[in-house]
Each structure stands twice: as structure tokens, then as C-alpha cells.
Amino acid sequence: MSVAAPAPTVSRPGDDRAAQVVGFGTGNEMGALSAKQINFHLMGYYPITPSTEVAERIDEMKAAGEHDIVMVPADGEHGAAGICFGAAVAGGRVFNATSAQGLLYSLEQLPVQSGTRYPMLLDLATRAVSGPLDIRGDHSDVYYALNTGWLIFMARDPQAVYDFNLMALRVAERADVRLPAIVAFDGFFTSHQKRRVSTFVDDATVQEWLGPVLEPVKALDPRHPVTIGPYMNDPDLINNKYQLERAMDAAMAAIPDVFAEFETLSGRRYEPVDLYRMEDAQVAVFLLNSAAETAKDVADRLRAKGVAAGVVSPNVIRPFPADAIRQALRGVRAVLIGERSSSYGAHGANLTHEVKSALKDDPDNRTLCLSRVYGLGGRDFYAEDAEAFFGLALEAAESGVVEVPFDYYGVEPGDPAKPQPRRGTPALTREEVTSGKLKVTPAPDGRLQVEAPPYWELATKPKRVVPGHGSCPGCGIFPALDQFLRGIEGDVVVLYQTGCAMVVSTGYPYTSHRVTYVHNLFQNGAAALSGLVEVFHERVRRGELPAGEDITFVMITGDGGMDIGMGAAIGAALRQHGMIMVEYDNQGYMNTGSQLSYSTPFGHLTSTSHVGPAEVGKAFHHKDTPQIMAATNIPYVFTGVEGYPDDLVRKAVKAQWYAQHVGTVYGKILISCPLNWKTEDRVGVDIVQAAVDCCFFPLYEVERGITHITYDPEPIDRRLAVADWLKLMGKTKHLGQPGNKAMLAAIEAEVERRWLRLKAKDKDPLL
Ligand SMILES: Cc1ncc(C[n+]2csc(CCOP(=O)(O)OP(=O)(O)O)c2C)c(N)n1
Ligand code: SF4
Ligand SMILES: [Mg+2]
């Protein structure tokens, strides 16, 4: 990280400032560095763009032995927020970082954290909330947090991320406040762009300034048991919330003091509201974070032309600094409040109404207010846009009238005169997707008998996903899915959970799918498909869809989707909806940049399981998802790989029959991912074959509860050593080193244990 560069120091002997270094860093790097210097007890996290790097960097530093933070990779953000809550209850100093859906998925845990008054810090690299899915930055996520009882600081640049992480925690942990805090910075703009930053040389400076964690209620003192979070009805709950409100007031009172103490330590001065040339401003814009910086340049230009323009930009929005804003806008004739979020139907996003209400409390105030929603989905905000905002405010100031109080800015209306976009590839006919060559009959022993031609005979069946999508060279997703889908006859509706397959095959207004495709949040795809399946059958029953209409419903998910979406998948399986869940397993969260998933094997290197003196890759063994799903007693579970197309097609045929006649099917296909595995593009199939031959990824099926191994490398002398598979990948190279022998032995032992159990199950139908 460039901020670690040792020179030049800017320490100033003779005053109270601590020694600092100057460097260049991004907002995410500053989040990570400040966390490392604080040396939190614990970070609970789940990856999501654009905040993922924060955890990645902290894990990298952990592997290098630079801090003691316990890093807990959660099964989703709901889990991450729960882990953080528990850690805070235990008296820990706690950290988390997230964005967009991550914040929303943890939302219900946030009022629990504030309502029980446990401070912690959450870095939020802001991003547009789905759907449709958009990974770029706006403020729609942080606006959801406005009513959670958390303090919210807005950090306009990487320096502010570093500084506010320290100051927010200090405010949050005060005895009269005790509230959790969010530090929000603009996704990509601040999270990823390097800026000049000063940071403290010694971690001790930070730790001494923060002091120890106060622990008014001790959860880990069994001699003095306490009840945390009791069931609380009226008349008590309103008192609890009133106290929270008072804590916000205490925070408002404390913030200037904490900012002043920090100025003494760092030399950097912050105010609750950042005011730029507001002393005598006649027109102003009110903007959050990076857009306010753009507007400052424009205010200078307008000043040069004789326009008294200024910029108001709060550094903290919870508590809302109403007094300071009222003061700042006192003599202003018109202000345009620009917001990167909306409150649909409310005639202005939330802060519009908060600014207006702050002004209303001053009976002498005559400031005209305009409200504009802008920059949604990461749409850039340039100087011309700030000029347009000032222009609207000026118009109102000069005419004394606000013609359009609320509107969206930067919307491009469609042109009905333009021809409808053409369908790229024609819809598939039922005849095209029905080869008639695949036959399935239930045998007396309950097992299905499949008759299928050699795979090459199915080659004429059209692909349901057409080429031209954006997957990486050597990616195994679509070759494997194509093989599987060739085994499915007739019409298919697919639901893709978030992940590489979804992102690379649909980018509005294009799609690679020749069949109906639906996307849903990857924690909830199985639930959404359950709804689709059920209404399909109900509409056929009601005669709203043609009788005889027969659709096979297939959910496609990554291995990560089977972490965060495990609850929904198990729920669907237990309810026995007629659908197939296919997991393509690339052993990591690839769409967000190669973080560990629970399916990542033990010891493997990922961007959240680094290799260094203090850490050797992933710390726990890979999840046995097929066995978990088999335990739900669904009729059919299988594993497969691209290298055995006949095997995979047979399993697809069975999967379709079971989904149509009995209930839910789950299958896991191991696919190559050169990016995650750190291999050449062309060797993926060989590595997958080695994973099968060393019995790390056995090919088998569990049909009506009975296990059958469908490929056994041992009798044909193909059994490989686990080490022979691992040495093929860059991500596991370190496991061949003499110092990691014990780890290699542990992986081998676990693979062997699972393989022997599988063989025992294959032999005994009762197991
Ligand atoms: C609630 C939520 N948390 C996190 C994310 C970010 N995210 C999108 S895809 C993904 C990883 C998906 O991994 P996997 O299912 O294995 O698919 P792959 O990307 O490997 O194809 C993550 C973490 C999100 N979109 N929503
Ligand atoms: S990152 Fe891996 S899984 Fe994703 S598209 Fe590239 S090769 Fe495929
Ligand atoms: Mg994956």
C-alpha cells in the first residue's frame, strides 16, 4: 500500500501533533489502514463491490502479522452484522465494511445494535441499491440507514475516510453516546481513487487517542450475569427509543469537541457541516461527499463572474446538523438540494425535507428550496452539472419563484419513434430443444433408467446460452452449463443468482439467453423460483396458461450463492418445489474478485485468505454442499464435471424427471476458473479431471436417498494423490512447500475421510 512509504514525515515537534507520513491512498485503503491501526478485536464481513477491498487489505496485513484483528468471513451480510453484534456484546471493538445490498441485507440487525447501545464502526462504500443490479455509486444505500439509530459520517475523500474512522469511533464510544457509527464514502470515486493522505506513523498514537473500550455491561462475567436485549413492550420501548434520541443529541454536542481534539492531534480541522464560500452566499448548492468537491470549483468560477455562490455539505447526517445548516443558509436566497437517492413519492429525497424543516424553524428565513435527484446508479457528476444546479438556484433567486420544486436531473427520455430493439437470436422452438433421443423410465428398484445417445449426437441441439457473453477465456461455466442443459428436453425458464454467470451474460440492453431468464438477489433465488414454479402450475390449473404447457425451471447459482442463499435453497428443498438448482463451483466469489467462499478448500489462497507468516490460506475445510442438500431428503442430488459429458447428460435427464414428477433437485458442477485458480486458460479441464481423480470432487448421485458413485478412479488405476492436483494451480503452490506439510496432510486426510464415507454409502443403501 503506497501509504506505507516512510518519508517524508510531517511531524511538528513543539506542538501536540503526532508524527505522520504523507502518501497516496484510496478510501478503501484508508479504511483498512485505520482499522489495522485501531487493531479492532474483530471484523465480521461479507464481500461486496466496491467495499470488498477493505477486508481484503486487512486480511493481507493479518497474513503479514501486522495486527491481531480476528477476521470472520460471514455467510452473508446478515450473518456479518450478527457476528459484529455478538462481538460488541462480548466487549470487543468491532468493524465491518459493506455496500448497497450488503447494507440492506444487514438492515434489520442495525436497530438491534443501536437499540442495545453497542458502539461499532461500519465503513460503507456507497453504491446503488438493486434492482436492477448496478454496482456503481450513489447514496441510495446510506439513505436506508437514516432511521436505524446509527451515527452517520460522510467522508468526501480518502483522507476523510481515515480521519472519520477514528473520530466516529471516538464519538460512538463516549459514555453518553454509545451508538454504532457508519462512515460513508462514495463508491469507486472515493473507494478506488488514490489521493494524497497523511496518516499517523505509530499505531499507538491511534490506540492511545481512542483509549480502551468501555464496558458498562459485562456479558462475559459469569459471576454477574446480565440480560441483554429483553423482550420489551410498552410502556418501556418508547423510553428506550427516547434514550436513543438523547444519545443522538449527546453525539451532536460531542462532535465539535472530538473534531477539535483530533485537530490538535493531526492538524486537520473538520466541522459538522463543510461550508465553502458561504459567508455572503446568495445562491448555494447542498450536496453530499465527492459531488460537493466538484461544486466548489464551480462556485469559484461563478464568484469570478460576480455571483455570490457557495456550497453546503454536511460531514455528518446523523445526527442531522440542523442548526448549522439553518445558520449557513440564513442569508441565502435560493438553495438547490441535490441528492443521489430518492424517496419515491415524497417529492424530494430525505435530506430535502430535513433541510426544509431546519429552515422552517427559523421564522425569518426566506430561502427558496429546489430539490433534484441526480447521479443514480453512479451517473457521473461533472462541473457542467454543478453549473446547471447553480443555474437553477440563480433563476429562482432572481425571479423569487421556484418553478419546479422537485425533479430528476440527468434523465434521458426514451424516443417512442425509435424502432423497438430487435431480438438478436430467434426464440427457440419446442422442436429444436427436444431431441427425442433421451428416454427415462423408472425401474422397479426406484432408480431411473436413462437411455441417452453418445454426447456428440446431441451436438445439433441449439445452445440456450449463445456465445458472445463476457466470460474470461478458459472459463468453465458455460461449457458445463451447456452440457447440462443439453440433457434437458423442451422448454426451460432459468433463474440466475448474482455471480459471474449472471453478470457476464446480461448487460442491459443485451442478453445471451435464448430462454426466459430472471435474475434475483443471490441470497433469495431459490425462494423466487419457488414462487415462479408454483404460479406456473396454478395458472395452468386455472386455465390461464395452455393445458399441456410444460416448463422445466432451473436455478443457476455459484458456490457463493449457496453460502448466502443456503437458507432459501434449503427452504425450497424442504417444500419440494419442482425445480432444479445447479451450482457451478469455481471455489470462490469470483464476480467480486476472488474472495473465499465456504466451498474454497482448506489452505487455498484467495483475496480474503492470504498466505504469509501469520496465515496460510483458508482456515477451514470446504463445504460439502451436496451432502447438506441430500440431508433435506430431496429426490435427487448429483455432482458433475464437463469432462464427463455422458455422465452429466444422464444426470440432467434424471434431474428433469425428478423436478417434473417428484420435487427439488440439486447438483454441483465443478468448473474451471483460471482467474481464481491462477492457471493458464487452456488447462482447466485437466485440473478438474485431477480434482475428480484425487477424489476431492467425486462424481456421484444420491437418488431417492441412495448414494451411487458414478465414476471411481481406483479400480481403473487413475487415483491421484491430492498433492498432484494441488500442484497444478497457482493458488495452491504454497501447499507443496516443506513448511506446509501438516496442512497438506490435513487436506489429504479430509478428502480421504469424505471419500471413504461416500464409498460406504455407495455400498450400503441405508447409509
Ligand atoms: C447481499 C449481497 N452481498 C454481496 C453481494 C456481492 N456479490 C455479488 S456476486 C458475489 C459472489 C458470487 O459468488 P458465486 O456465487 O460463487 O459466483 P461467482 O461470482 O463465483 O460466479 C458477491 C459476493 C451482493 N450482490 N449482494
Ligand atoms: S472469473 Fe472465473 S468464473 Fe468468472 S468469468 Fe472469469 S473464469 Fe469464469
Ligand atoms: Mg464462485
Image (cartoon, helix red, strand yellow):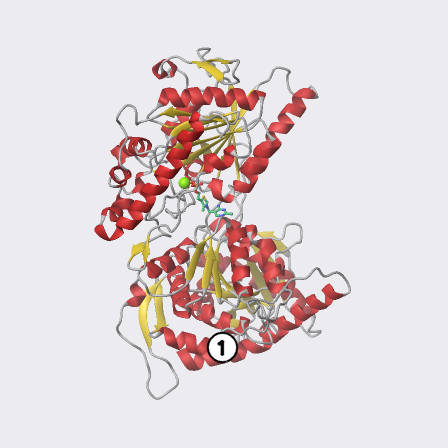
Q: Badge 1: how crowded within 10 Å, few (<14), some, or many (20+)?
A: many
Whether residue 77 sits left or right of residue 4 in the image: it is right
Q: Residue at x 46, y 28 (%)?
A: 513
Query: Element at badge 1?
Result: helix
Whether residue 597 sits left or right of residue 172 in the image: it is left
User: Observer-nearest residue: 102 or 658?
Assistant: 658
Inspect this view and state whether residue 465 appears.
no
Whether residue 411 sits left or right of residue 473 in the image: it is right
Q: Residue at x 31, y 33 (%)?
A: 688
Q: Residue 421 at x, y = what percent?
A: 49, 29
Q: Which amino acid type is marked by label 1?
A: Phe
User: Observer-nearest residue: 656 or 442?
Assistant: 442
Inspect this view and state whether residue 712 appears.
yes
Q: Residue 480 at x, y = what percent?
A: 38, 28
Outermost residue to the bottom: 14
Q: Which residue is mark 1?
A: 259
Q: Residue 613 at x, y = what percent?
A: 28, 59
Q: Residue 235 at x, y = what percent?
A: 77, 65
